[in-house]
Image (cartoon, helix red, strand yellow):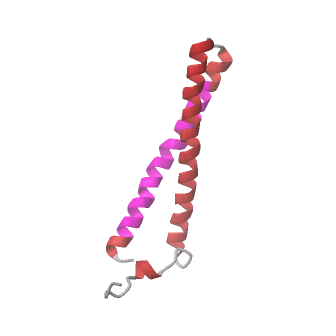
Amino acid sequence: MSSRPPTPASNSAPDDDPVRRRRAQFAKWTLLANRVGYLLLALAMALFVIAFAFGFSPTMASLIIGSLVVSFILLAPSIVLGYAVKAAERDDVERGF
């Protein structure tokens, strides 16, 4: 219902532009890494509560530390890359690309 002509950003699909296609791929992978990373963080917290209630064992400590380490390895780059993808998309919209 707007009288403005469509901008190039609104009428170009991500499949047309290789940069947008690559950016969409990064967004998909960062979303997956975020979900898995936070799931592992929640698992580590649940394991800690279970170990606290029933007693710590070397196996339980290893599981807690392992899930925390993998969680941090996944979350650190995925959070940064997720913000980078969002900033690049916002910049494209502001510039009219």
Q: Which residues are magenta?
A: 64-92
Q: Is residue 70 magenta?
A: yes
Rendered-image quadrant of the C terminus: bottom left
Q: Residue at x 56, y 58 (%)?
A: 28
Q: Residue at x 31, y 86 (%)?
A: 4
Q: Quadrant of residue 62?
A: top right
Q: How many marks?
A: 0
Q: Residue at x 60, y 24 (%)?
A: 47
Can residue 69 be seen here? The reply is no
Task: Pinpoint residue 93: horizontal percent, then vertical percent.
Answer: 37, 72
Q: Quadrant of residue 86?
A: bottom left
Task: Pinpoint residue 19: horizontal percent, then vertical percent.
Answer: 50, 71
Can residue 37 be seen here? The reply is yes
Task: Pinpoint residue 57: horizontal percent, then vertical percent.
Answer: 65, 13
Task: Please determine whether, in this image, residue 91 is positioned above or below residue 29.
Answer: below
Task: Please determine whether, in this image, residue 71 is positioned above or below residue 24.
Answer: above
